[in-house]
Amino acid sequence: MRILTFACSTAVFWPFFSLNALANSVPQSQQPSGFSSTEINQKSRDKSTITADNTWSDSNRSEVEDVKFQLQNISQRNFTPSRGVPSLTIANPYGFGADRGFYSGLSYQVDTRGGLDEENDGDATWGFGLGLGNAQKSVGAELSYTLASFGQNGRDFGSGGFNLKLHRKIADGWGVSAGWNSFLSIGDDNDLDDSLYFATTKIFKTRENINSAFSRVAGTIGVGNGQFRTEDDIANDNDNFNVFGSLAFRVARPVSFITEWTGQDLAMGLSVSPFRTIPMTINLGARDIAGAGDGARFVFGVGTGF
């Protein structure tokens, strides 16, 4: 059985492509900023709605100064979207999420698990979701859908699964989340694992100015079953919980380097937000580097939010 862990996580990690919705919107809350993974999301991490936290994504202005500035210039506000925010994770869930707004992302992996001997075994997934609630004052929620089939590889078009994520900001740069991936699946043989997880993410400031090199480091750790199980547990059909984790290094303001343990193997990659006025984040990475499956697999993703 092919284990499409990348596809399974698509709807969760698209929020980790955390993007600013509007450049000059008055902040509703200052939440932890997202790398993405994330990761990322998201996934309410910024003064807008879909970024994880100002620690990861904002400038040095305090919340009060930012609000004052926006109120003074409210009549001159423009609604040009701002730059996206690099992800917190590659495929793992993380501790932040979207309070409001819509996000979407498309991913592609060159080969799936067990598919190196098959012809045209590349696989694409499309994730899209909606953020609700308020993670600063109470609880934020994400409801998303992962479309795991475009009608290729013998599967019906539209096959996929619904995902639910609850998240809460518990301190500056620190968030927790709990989720249920593929709690409802549509279509047959979509390779999406019914997975429960709990994750927490902490963002550390290594330099005050976010424009400085290596100014932020984000650590994520979590436990989950389903897609996060070890290879042995999957082979033996044991529904055990397993540990996963990620480290994201903000190499430059628009670029982050991510390394993570998915519960089965090692993954590494880059997350880039290349455009100053377009809320888009691009992830490039490799999975199964340490030897799981049939060898390393290249993965690509692009996401946006508003």
Image (spheres, grey):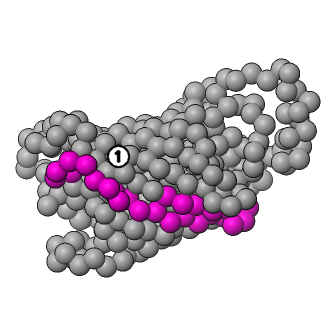
Amino acid type shown at disc 1: Thr
Specify the quadrant that holds the N terminus. Answer: bottom left
Q: In this view, does 206 lie above or below 239?
A: above
Report x, y in % for residue 219.
56, 64
The part of the image, by quadrant, that contains residue 19 is top right
The part of the image, by quadrant, that contains residue 216 is bottom right
Span colored in magenta: 165-190
Of 58 and 177, nearer the camera is 177
Is 125 displayed left or right of 245 in the figure?
Answer: left
Report x, y in % for residue 246.
48, 63
Secondary structure at numbered mark 1: strand
Specify the quadrant that holds the C terminus. Answer: top right
Magenta stretch mostly in which secondary structure?
strand
- Tell me if residue 85 is in the magenta stretch: no
Report x, y in % for residue 282.
46, 38
- Any part of residue 68 in sight: yes
**Residue positioned 91% across, 38% down in the render:** 68
Of 284 and 279, nearer the camera is 279
Is 209 displayed left or right of 165 in the figure?
Answer: right
Q: What residue did someone put label 1 on?
A: 146
Report x, y in % for residue 284.
40, 43
Give neighbour class at mark 1: few <14, some 14-19, many 20+ (Cα, 10 Å). Answer: many
**Residue positioned 49% across, 58% down in the render:** 165
Is 292 displayed left or right of 29 in the figure?
Answer: left
- Tell me if residue 167 is in the magenta stretch: yes
**Residue positioned 24% across, 44% down in the render:** 159
